[in-house]
Amino acid sequence: MKMAVSVVLLISFLSAIATLPSEALNVRGHLLKSKTFRSPPILLAPGSVSNKFYADIDFPQGHLAIKSFDAEVVDENGVPVPLHETYLHHWVAEPYYALKNSNHSTDTQKLPKGVLKRNDGVCKTTLGQYFGLGSETRHTATWVPDPYGIEAGNPEKAPEGYEEKWLLNVHAIDTRGVADKPGCTECKCSFYNVTIDEYGRTIPKNYTGGLYCCYDQTQCQVKEGFNGEVRKLFLQYKVTWLDWTDAVVPVNIYIFDVTDTGLLDGNPEHSCKVEYQVDECSSVNRANKDCTHVKTSRAVLPRGGDIVFGVAHQHSGGSGSSLHGQDGRLLCESLPTYGTGQEAGNEANYIVGMSTCYPKPGSIKVSDSEVLTVVSNYSSDRQHTGVMGLFYILVAEPQQLAPAPSLCFSFPAKSGNKMKMSVSVVLLITILCAFAPLPSEALNVRGHLLKSKTFRSPPFFLSPGSVSDKYHYDMDFPQGHLAIKSFDAEVVDENGVSVPLHETYLHHWVVEPYYALKNSHSADSEKLPKAVPGGNDGVCSTLGQFFGLGSETRRTATWIPDPYGIEVGNPEKAPEGYEQKWLLNIHAIDTRGVVDKPGCSECKCDFYNVTVDEFGDTIPKNYTGGLYCCYDQTQCQVKDGFNGEVRKLFLQYKVTWLDWTDAVVPVKIYIFDVTDTSLLDGTTDSCKIEYQVEECTAVNRANDDCIHVMTSRAVLPRGGDIVFGAAHQHSGGSGSSLYGQDGRLLCESLPTYGTGQEAGNEANYIVGMSTCYPKPGSIKVSDGEVLAVVSNYSSDRQHTGVMGLFYILVAEPQQPAPAPSLCFSFPAKWCLPAWISRNM
């Protein structure tokens, strides 16, 4: 490409022009924020137990929509600690209301200092948490899909005189050098040598193991002669959230417990025992290879709606859990992933993840007071004590207000009074009702593991003022027939440290597939091209990339919402004799010590002292700045006497994907370019990619009207539902929007400017663009519809080489519907996420 570019793609064809209204609906972007915290330190010696409650933990403030809560145990250096050294039995997080002025007035002294704020379930004495997991925490999703969120911090819901705070409970067992790791992690009483529980009550003789025996400061038996130091550990947790807006659809949190006998006993308060025992299977069952323990319970759902998320919690030995409706239909199945190695997140014989359900929006409905059944399966090849069978779902009530037509976010793209039995991830929903029989065979949609891997580009070398703009073929990329869910990147040094934009300006990076000849040395292949382009679905040949961003890369979403994905690696789509590979282009400018940072990053020709472009063609005199002047190995002017070393840098990129399945709905990629004049010219391709913004006139300046507006129109080849949208602009940009043929706003994408010096928050640079995630089915476009892109820049000064691109993903309406319950298993560290663009 003569002008490889940032983030997005064009969709243009030939058609009539549609007028824009003087004022269109404006749904402004909402920034997705993320922050990582640590619990107070947890001190553990070999065999010891910590099960403490921490009130008023660090937590984001304000009226928020929580999108995820991920956690893991780390040491003082932030290194993840494996389960075979420290077993994370569970962690739970729950909000509560604290009295604001408990010591300063007579009235407040009569009030309780804290009021619990439980979830929406009915098993509230033991399962009141909002978030919580156990050993599976690193590879289990907590992401709440768009446009939904868990509401927190609403001041109108706090009792008068109280404010919302958060409580954390962490139950961890140090198993270094213990006599029996499974016995210690399953809290078998014989290994703990206790006869009373933490409240001083005698433990029944028939109670062989569970939370009564491994409470705070108990000690599991350690092998003779084993010595190990006391370690200071932390629960490191990352919260991702949005400031609350009416465009977010709130969800109710429910936890089911397979030990709940409330419906059976006729107990309106329910009977949630939280844990149970799995006895070793009989010799008859063993002979029949039937060593599976199945436990079920039923409860009534207080309020119905759409299930938008579901996951189970089990301990080692678990083989999966499922939730069924009153008619026996499968609502969600959650399956365990067991580790196979020694490293943290892949510990052999431990459950390291549970698959999660993300149904197609509106496909899994439950009714008010519907009786739901939870089924929990464990291997009974040996006895298991203190196991759990919980099922957590998020339900959006049907009467909730619909979100605004274009819900926009910007992405960087688990709790009460002292619980006797705090637990892992989920919540109960039970009340009183009649039984519903289960069918002999229910629909089984097995979970699909969401995978993620971080790669590095080949190194590029930069000295002060220098430019690198290279293409790397056959780049590292996941192999197979895949559904790509996100592609996130940033510039790092040799140590993996993020490099700020004011030192190395990332003009753009783009990633594009191509087809490479498999056997280029055969007689037949010598007549064939060695490579065939494999670009996106747009019509602008210079914008063929699948992924790409620029300075905004750390805080712009690339996450593709469920159940959608970008299909890659389909062998049936490759030309015969070819295989799909990937191309990476990185354009970076070192601005250390330069005479003018904005001038160098905007590629102003004066500062580069060039008269010909990279192809040897003379640069026109009226071309004052842009890609023609800052190509590979050019040099921007540096201040006299400034010296700086040559640095070895990398583009570090993280790809998140699923193995392809028919349950994934494919999307088409389109990029619009505001410089495209093909519709006006009657040409097939007139995408100039960059343009110039002149300084505003004295008259406009006097009227405080220094805004440069540029528009262009193009035809969408194929219509459908818009599921994602984002713009790309350079510094000076003030936002871009995409409109339908009737002038309706399809998506608006707004910039976030940094305010500091650290990477991801660099002052005067665009560090993120808001992204649109419309409510599924709410933003439709038609085949051949003329769409208009509008790009706004400040013209307070001149800007050269700017861009105005708009990227959308469209799911065609004729795509087959996904399976009733599309299940994934996520790595909890992601983020989201970070799979989502970072805001750290």
Image (cartoon, rainbow, N blue to C red):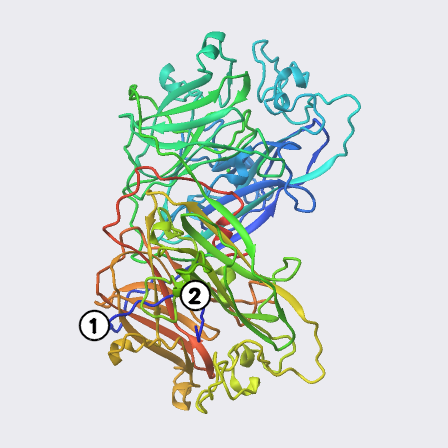
Please, what is the three-letter code of the amino acid marked with disc 2?
Val
Element type where label 1 sits in the image:
loop
> Which mark identifies residue 15?
1
100 lies left or right of 121: right
Q: Where is residue 180 drawn, in percent x and y?
A: 66, 21
Seen from this angle, which residue lies furthest front? 523
Q: Amino acid at mark 1?
A: Ser
- Residue lying at 80% horizontally and 23% vertically, measured from the top left: 225
- Percent x, y for residue 567? 37, 52
Tell which of 443 and 169 is nearer to you.
443
Which residue is pictured at 30% across the width and 67% down the height? Answer: 11
Q: Quadrant of residue 740?
A: bottom left
Q: Residues within 10 Å of mark 1 (few under 14, many from 20)?
A: some
Residue placed most toward the observer, 133 or 589: 589
Q: Quadrant of residue 26?
A: bottom left
Residue corresponding to mark 2: 7
